[in-house]
Image (cartoon, grey):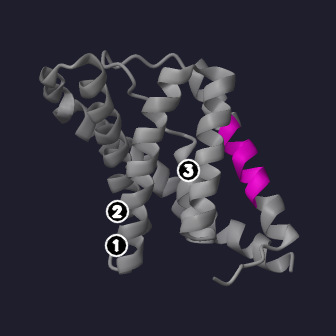
Amino acid sequence: MKKQKISAKTVALMAMMIALAMIFSYVETMIPINFGIPGVKLGLANLVIVAAIYLFGGKQAFLISIVRIFLSGFMFGNLASIMYSLAGGLLSLAVMLLLKKTDKLSILAVSVMGGICHNIGQLIVAMLVVENLKLIFYVPVLLISGFLTGLLIGIVCRVILPAVKRAYESAR
């Protein structure tokens, strides 16, 4: 198996993206949004993950996502929040990577599907934890919130990604 070297510039940018995602996670804890459904949030940190998918690819986006989930969970949450974030984050990341690989969907569509899948992943864990399948009735609200937050993240990412790519490439 061939080892792939990662440049110092890439490592530095990945570290900055982890830090930014953690800041977004912290800011999100301070936003008093209550939709009446536990766990519905804006998903600001996912902006970094979507950008990482399009800037680096799957391996680096996975690493950024995992590190962000664990660090944010230990700093701003608890073991349960880590478990829910892992379920949502990994399902979301896997779906977004598969959809991006097709090259048939826009960044908006990929982000929307990521938002929806993040909520579905968390709902599956919630149903397992509380051992109650009636939580499935939350699906319509979670689909709508995942769509809206995914759309918002996709729009912002579509706007900022060209500038981030230019800055990353000019630093070579």
Across and down, in percent, residue 136 comes to: 15, 29
**Residue at disc 2, secondary structure:** helix
Circle 2 residue: 109
The range drawn in magenta is 14-22
- Left of 94 or right of it: where is 26? right
Q: Amino acid at mark 3?
A: Leu
The quarter of the picture where residue 27 lies is top right
Local crowd size for mark 1, using a 10 Å CA cut-off: few (<14), some (14–19), many (≥20) = few
Across and down, in percent, residue 163 comes to: 69, 68
Main secondary-structure element of the magenta-colored stretch: helix
Circle 1 residue: 105
Across and down, in percent, residue 46 comes to: 53, 47
Circle 3 residue: 47
Residue furthest to the front in view is 1
Q: CA distance from mark 3 to mark 1?
A: 17 Å
Q: Amino acid at mark 1?
A: Leu
Q: Is residue 118 above or below residue 74?
A: below
Local crowd size for mark 2, using a 10 Å CA cut-off: few (<14), some (14–19), many (≥20) = some
Is residue 15 visible to us here? yes
Earlier-in-chain disc, 2 versus 3: 3
* Count of marks overlaid on the render: 3
Residue drawn at x 78%, y 68% as measured from the top left: 10
**Residue at disc 1, secondary structure:** loop
- Left of 47 or right of it: where is 67? right
